[in-house]
Image: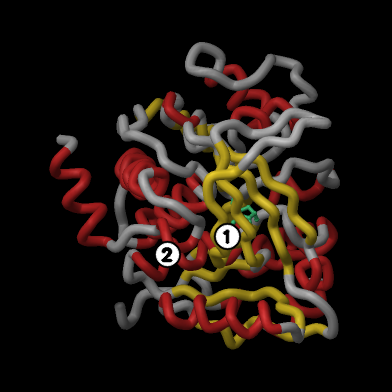
């Protein structure tokens, strides 16, 4: 899409080691698995691949280790169409995520960050031109918080909207919030940031949850409520809900990443807020019907067909 400002993703790149089992084991429990697969993942890389599959120009800023996983991960990103020139190499291991997926498609994840922990503010300075010319920047919390904080400052200074996916949830310096255009937590992340002040976000309290998050200083909130859809709110206008598409989930890993990639792409393509949220919900819905993180991201024609079928 010549002439369109690219989306830039600043974030993690992982190899996902995925064991499938009937149920996710409880603490101290051993269960027999049914399958094992290795997929490219990482919240940052997944969001970048989601955008690239939709055919929109995207580049990534991050770090890989100088191990065999690193090389593979870069190839996967490039194969999907992501510009990887902003990805640096560190001595040591690349990020790895150990994931268990149940037969209902639920997951639990442990991330060992490896090189992702070495993404510094200096990496952002080294890619300042890339950031400056972005249409929108996507970030998550699998890289150091001080880097995300600095990213917010740069985005505000350069007038580039920042979409922050606060996953995994962790304490953020209060100054981060005011530099965020769209804050996109899921239910448990929203509860974390509000210290459960209004309980876990759900269909009935989503407007109160969004209002409390807006009060932290973010300019807009998109609450990702899983099978209950999404709730969007900004300070200036009344909030609205977008119902989820009903699909049979095989693997919900990276559904939130699919949503964020789709949401950013929708906005960049000039869709309205409500259209972007619906488009992103379709991207996420398709992704949960497929196994793996990056392999599950749909192409634009698949999303358009899906939306048509569900209209
Ligand atoms: O959001 C899903 C992702 O979380 C996985 O791909 C895994 O790598 C972890 O980062």
Instruction: Give the mark toward the camera: 2 or 1.
Output: 2
Determine whether 88 is above or below 288 in the image: below
Query: Disc number at residue 125?
Result: none
- Read off the residue under disc 1: 138
Circle 1 packing at 10 Å, graded few (<14), some (14-19), many (20+), is many
Give the total number of marks visible in the rendering. Answer: 2
Q: Earlier in the sequence, mark 2 or mark 1?
A: 2
Q: Quadrant of ligand 1?
A: bottom right
Q: Are marks 2 and 1 in contact (CB under 8 Å)?
A: yes
What residue is drawn where x is 20% and y is 53%?
A: 304
Q: Seen in the image, is 16 located left or right of residue 7?
A: right
What residue is drawn where x is 49% and y is 51%?
A: 260
Q: Nearer the viewer, residue 79 or 139?
A: 79
Q: Quadrant of residue 267?
A: bottom left
Determine whether 283 is above or below 156 in the image: above
What residue is drawn where x is 61% and y is 38%?
A: 185
- Residue 156's x, y, as percent? 66, 61
Indicate the secondary structure of the residue bearing disc 1: strand
- Residue 119's x, y, as percent? 78, 72
Q: Seen in the image, is 39 located left or right of residue 11?
A: left
- Residue 160's x, y, as percent? 57, 64
Q: Is residue 188 visible?
A: yes
- Read off the residue under disc 2: 51
- Residue 311's x, y, as percent? 15, 35
Q: Nearer the viewer, residue 194 or 304?
A: 304
What residue is drawn where x is 74% and y is 41%?
A: 169
Furthest-front residue in view?
Answer: 32
Circle 2 packing at 10 Å, graded few (<14), some (14-19), many (20+), is many
């Amino acid at each position: 899409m010549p002439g369109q400002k690219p989306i830039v993703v600043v974030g993690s790149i992982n190899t996902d080691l995925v064991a499938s089992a009937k149920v996710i084991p409880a603490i101290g429990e051993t269960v027999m698995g049914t399958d094992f697969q290795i997929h490219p993942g990482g919240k940052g890389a997944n969001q970048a691949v989601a955008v690239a599959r939709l055919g929109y120009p995207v580049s990534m800023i991050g770090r890989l280790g100088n191990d065999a996983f690193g090389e593979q991960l870069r190839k996967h990103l490039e194969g999907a169409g992501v510009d990887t020139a902003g990805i640096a190499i560190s001595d040591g291991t690349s990020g790895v995520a150990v994931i268990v997926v149940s037969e209902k498609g639920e997951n639990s994840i442990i991330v060992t960050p490896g090189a992702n922990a070495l993404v510094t503010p200096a990496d952002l300075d080294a890619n300042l031109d890339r950031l400056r010319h972005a249409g929108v920047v996507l970030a998550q919390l699998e890289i150091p918080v001080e880097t995300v904080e600095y990213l917010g400052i740069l985005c505000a200074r350069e007038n580039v909207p920042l979409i922050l996916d606060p996953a995994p949830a962790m304490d953020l310096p209060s100054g981060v919030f005011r530099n965020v255009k769209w804050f996109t937590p899921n239910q448990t992340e929203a509860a974390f940031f509000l210290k459960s002040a209004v309980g876990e976000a759900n269909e009935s309290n989503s407007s109160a949850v969004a209002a409390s998050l807006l009060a932290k200083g973010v300019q807009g909130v998109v609450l990702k409520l899983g099978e209950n859809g999404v709730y969007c709110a900004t300070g200036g206008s009344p909030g609205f809900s977008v119902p989820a598409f009903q699909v049979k989930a095989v693997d919900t890993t990276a559904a939130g990443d699919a949503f964020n990639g789709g949401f950013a792409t929708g906005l960049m393509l000039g869709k309205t807020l409500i259209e972007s949220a619906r488009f992103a919900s379709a991207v996420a819905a398709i992704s949960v019907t497929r196994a793996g993180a990056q392999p599950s991201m749909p192409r634009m024609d698949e999303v358009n067909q899906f939306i048509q079928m569900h209209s």
